[in-house]
Amino acid sequence: MSLVKQVGMLFAKKWIGGVTVQDVVSQAKRSNDSGEKVIINYLGEDYFDKSRIKQSVATYSRLLSQMKNEGIAGDIAVKPTQLGLSIGYELFLSNYMKVVELAGKSHMFVWMDMEDHMFVDDSIRAYLTALKSHRNVGICIQSKLMRSLWDIKRIVKSGGKIRLVKGAYPARKGISYFDKAEVDRNYIKCMEYLFKNSEEFMLATHDDRMIEMALKLRKKSKAVVLFGMLRGIRGSLARKLALDGERMYIYIPFGPEWLEYSVRRLKEMEHSTLIIRSIISD
């Protein structure tokens, strides 16, 4: 490992679960011990090399086996382009279904992460296909995208499960909201719809205002609400929510591509501020 990577890992290890399956399972145990469940993601995306795609599927298989063997309470998350969507839809669908079926045998849940806007249609298409025969699946929707409320309505009507985030990918004119206030407003619209129309969903946010609003909305709703946060970001708040009896999930990425992930997160102003704070606090 180069000196740059060695120094980078000293900082990144607070929000990355390590490089190997055993690394991340050990971190997941710590979260479980604090009353938090986990969502584990093997880092990697936009693959055109079929051997890397095959290796990702194999890694998820090992991860699921290890989680089951060690009694980890939590889910996994996959990225469409990690499973072949950059090459073609059919390759992606085949690999996605393999992971979903493997997870089903271990009684585990699979979240599909959402990537750049150009992959949204095929990602939702594959998700709705899996949902017809598997109930252990959910999908991430980004409030940064203008289309997201329409997508949520379609998915909820099909019986799907949403994980609502603000969005980590670059904005596009006419497709995405650019202003933070607009992204927040759309998040609130999507959240309000979920409270009224969905039986169970996850709100993945570090935003105090969104969390406070969610806790108020839940008093008038019968929906089961899960909360999600990134590992190492606002850890004390996550632990407090868990201690208060909330269903708290910590998203833990791992793998050799941790540097690329960290750089992308740091480019997001909101996340970079939180990450910098996390380095010197919880």
Image: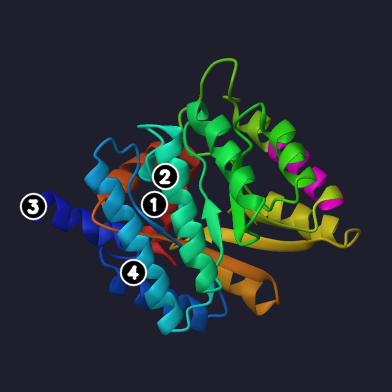
The mark that comes first in sequence, 2 or 3, is: 3
Find disc 3 in the rendering and name its residue.
2
Q: Which residues are magenta?
A: 185-196
For the residues marked 2 and 3, what is the alpha-carbon distance in whole angstroms?
A: 24 Å
Q: Residue at x 64, y 55 (%)?
A: 133
Which amino acid is tagged 4? Arg
Q: Nearer the viewer, mark 4 or mark 3?
A: 4
Asked whether 200 or 60 is in front, the reply is: 60
For the residues marked 1 and 4, what is the alpha-carbon distance in whole angstroms?
A: 33 Å
Asked whether 145 or 215 is in front, the reply is: 145
Find disc 2 in the rendering and name its residue.
272
Q: Residue at x 49, y 26 (%)?
A: 118
Direction top: furthest residue: 174
Do the residues bearing badges 3 and 1 touch, measured as CB atoms within 8 Å? no
Q: Mark on residue 56?
A: none
For the residues marked 3 and 1, what is the alpha-carbon distance in whole angstroms?
A: 23 Å
Asked whether 203 or 197 is in front, the reply is: 197
Find disc 4 in the rendering and name its residue.
62
